[in-house]
Amino acid sequence: MDKVLRDRRAIAIFILPALLVFSSVVILPIAFSGYYSLLEWNGAGKSTFIGLSNYLEMFTNPSTYFVKGIVNSALLAGLSVFVQIPLALGLALLISHGIRLEGFFRNVYFIPVIISTTVIGQLWMKIYHPNNGMLNILLTDLGLAALKRNWLADPSISLGAAFFVLIWQYIGYHMLLMYSAIKAIPTSLYEAAEIDGCSKSQLSRHIAIPLIMPMIKVCVTFALIGSLKTFDLIYVLTKGGPIHATEVPTTLMFANIFLNYRYGMGSAMAIFILVECLVLTVFVQRFFKVENYEF
Amino acid sequence: MKRFSKIVALLTVVAMTLTMLGGVALAQEKKTLNVWHLWTTESDANAKSFNIVLKEWQALHPDVDVVIDATENEAYKTKLKTAMAANEVPDVFFAWGGGFAKPFVEAGQVLALDDYLADGTMDRLLGGALDNVTYGGKTYGLTFIQWVGTLYCNKEMFDANGVSIPTTNDELLAAVAAFKAKGIVPITVGAKDGWPAMFFQNVYAVRTAGAQLSNEALSGASSFNAPEFVASAKYLDDLVKAGGFDPGALALTYDEAKMPFLAGQVPMIYQGSWLAGEIQDPTLSQVVDKVVAVNWPSLSDGKGDPNEILGGAIDSLMVSNNASDKELAADFVKYITENMSRESFKLGAGIATWKIDMAGIEVSQLVQNIIDFASKSTGAVLAWDTFLSCEAAERHKSLVQEIFAGQLSPENFALEMSKLQ
């Protein structure tokens, strides 16, 4: 084995197939998008090279709604990191401490993750339906008719309504990741702490959370990136509407390419999203220093 | 056992080789024609008529293998545009004329059909049938049906609530008030999709400005920032403020919005003539034979003739410039559109764009209503989103949605529209 690893030619030959596939499906399309982003192109006809004008326009022309989209996605990222992850952590701690029906709760929380996002979007469209939606009917039956809203039709609340579903959907995902990390902590550590007189909350605070920090970091990275490139649920639920209230960078990218025939502009947005995600990942890796423990 | 599996393996190889040879032999005899369209809903009148006509054509051309690829409306647009960008356009494809197909034509992806129409085909088409598929004096597609913007009224609900079918805008507002007072949503609209909402402003513009001025403004010859177009937005704004629509309309798609009408819960919907087929389909609708169709109500101060309509011939079939057998593809398009014109008309999808033999064609009362007021029409305006270029169309729909949300004044609507010209 060592001999093979020292042979550079062997290494080159063995990584070549994977490298080729990776380049052709990931690197090349990105490079093409980068090139397209410098063009004014309708997707079918001739293209004109316009340099960085697309990038300039998407930040300076308010009718592209791109700045609004970035603000919305940043808001979602904030909600994911500061609301979704703490909630998921809380649930993970709760169900990992040997409560009754542990497996049942774990599965229930995980169900939204395994359902296709399109199905979830359709489901919540029905729940939010202004006239015969479950939410409004429930509010009426509870005598809270004053709280009834046109959840996805009112531009002032539709963003909140859409983000609620996004946060809800992936809580189970982060919970499961952290739950499995907690379960990997040897019980001997807990037992030792208990002998020293730790309460349940102290066990969580001083044993579980510090030891699963690496996993929390993974979750934060996933939540950040996931928020910045969220598309499917918003597209199904609101298509970025009503009147652009729920636009995120990806819905705008889609609209520019396929509705406005602006391949160049759409590609510029795609490149921006890519760079944004890369920068934030590096940022999280750099400033979220954690120690890895070997058990 | 080992010998047995050897024999099986040998036989399989022989069988596969033979089928391969067979396939090659057949492929040499049969031509293939790739066709893309968007009639995925079987109940859709155009889907039904396309399938009837396709069978007829296939019976006439047993040597041609027609490969159909149907994709749902919105996804179809995406798919076709992607194919255009990738230079993988099928031989024959459905496309809207006007602003939708313009970039494809300009990119040289679409075959000009003029050479194939000189055999007398032109004489069998009605006037105006090719207006929206003609670019730079050349014909790039053939239409089969002219759609007509139609106000469908559930007569049973109108009678039960003592309301009369509106012929003027004042009567429409009175009907809205009467239904609203009884807790009934007066008009259903799928404003989330944009285009159904857009129809209302477009048809008000037909009334306030008239077909001629509307078409001039759309083609850029006159400005949208004119009192007539301000008025069109004002009338819509008034209708929204009067509670004409479901307050949650901006969250509803077209498919969701037509359901309460088909279920007999909402008395009015303004849609294209294509909806008539679904209204008369007992498996989908509980309002069969209960609906009357009228033109959009008239205005007392409108410049447009009250007989003018929103609509036009824009649905078409086109041939790719890279089609393997252009003659065959053009022949296919000619045959299908001419015969679909008749079949779709029978099913109530709209008014035929070809001179068809009307003898023996019986249509429902609802379709007859549409034919009656459409044949009186003195001018027509296409839905604006099909006429405008794609980017302007998207912006236009978004502006109308802002009127529905009560966030855009009529003056600003006209001003913003003029910026798109």
Image: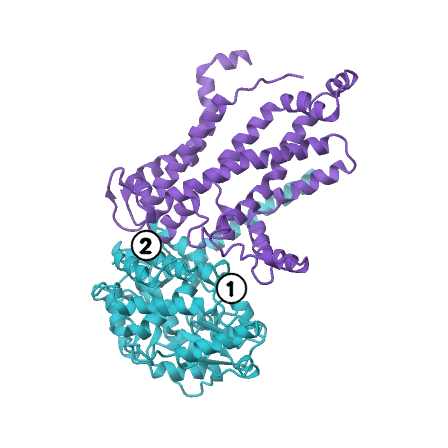
The residue labelled by disc 1 is B255
**B305 sits to left or right of A237:** left
Q: Residue B213: x percent and y percent?
A: 25, 71
Q: Residue furthest bottom?
A: B359
| Marked residue chain, label 2 | B
Asked if residue B120 can be seen in this view, the reply is no
- Residue A191: name its quadrant: top right
**Rendered colour, chain A:** purple
Q: CA distance from mark 2 to mark 1?
A: 24 Å
Q: Residue B173: x percent and y percent?
A: 44, 75
Q: Is residue B70 above or below residue A62?
A: below
| Marked residue chain, label 1 | B
Asked if residue B323 can be seen in this view, the reply is yes
Disc 1 residue type (three-letter): Asp
Q: Residues within 10 Å of mark 1 (few under 14, many from 20)?
A: few
- Residue B92: name its quadrant: bottom left
Q: How is the image coloured?
A: by chain
**Rendered colour, chain B:** cyan
| Residue at image point 53% right, 63% down | B256
> Is there one chain holding both mark 2 and mark 1?
yes
The C terminus of chain B: image quadrant: bottom left
Disc 2 residue type (three-letter): Glu
**B309 sits to left or right of B217:** right
Find numbered disc 1 in the image and state the secondary structure of the residue it sits on.
Answer: helix
- Residue A214: name its quadrant: top right
Q: Residue A221: x percent and y percent?
A: 52, 30
Find numbered disc 2 in the image and state the secondary structure of the residue it sits on.
Answer: helix
The residue labelled by disc 2 is B391
Q: Residue B276: x percent and y percent?
A: 48, 75
